[in-house]
Image: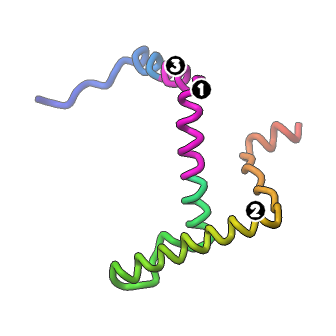
Amino acid sequence: MGPQPDPAPQDQQEALETRRREQLTDQWQQRYNIRAGVEGTISQAVRRTQIRRTRFTGLPKTHLGHIFAATAINIIRLDAWLTETPLGPTRTSHLARLGLAA
């Protein structure tokens, strides 16, 4: 059994249009909002605590480092909530900035 041929461009376009229509439903938006929250948490942990690389050798110490990083993120978020610090603005792409400047 050899490799399967690529789908026709028309099939690809229909699949793309189907996925785009799905994204307009409330159910899809609710699922995506959950994912966006998780992605935001991971991004914050990576930016604030450099969690992608561990400073420790061995699983127990690495696990403890992750617990400390999660605790730090929770404290940062609690402080922002208590001091009513506004959320950071969403990044604007270079292309969007050009459109806003025009």
* Circle 2 residue: 81
Residue at 51% x, 71% y is 51
Residue 55: % across, % down: 46, 83
Picture coordinates of residue 43, whole percent (x, y): 58, 59
Label 2 and label 3: CA atoms lie apart by: 40 Å
Location of residue 77 with respect to 90 vertically, above or below:
below
Task: Indicate the secondary structure of the residue bearing disc 1.
Answer: helix
| Residue 27 drawn at (x, y percent) | 54, 28
- Mark 1 → mark 2, Cα distance in angstroms: 28 Å
Disc number placed over residue 26 in the picture, else none: 1
Say which of 43 and 17 sits in front.
Answer: 43
Q: In the rendered image, which quarter contains the N terminus?
A: top left
Q: Position of residue 70 (x, y in %)?
A: 54, 70
Q: Counting other residues with Cα less than 10 Å from the Cα at mark 1, is it few (<14), some (14-19), or many (20 or more)?
A: few
Q: Magenta region, mostly helix, strand or loop?
A: helix
Picture quadrant of residue 20: top right
Task: Identify whether 47 is placed above or below 24.
Answer: below
Residue ID for mark 3: 17
Number of the front mark, 2 or 3: 2
Magenta-tinted stretch: 16-38
Mark 3 or 1: in front is: 1
Taking the magenta stretch, the answer to whether it contains residue 22 is yes
- The scheme the figure's colours follow is rainbow
Give the residue drawn at x 46%, y 16%.
Answer: 14
How far apart in space, not on screen, are marks 3 and 1 (Cα)? Answer: 17 Å
In this view, 85 is above or below 30: below
Quadrant of the image containing the C terminus: top right
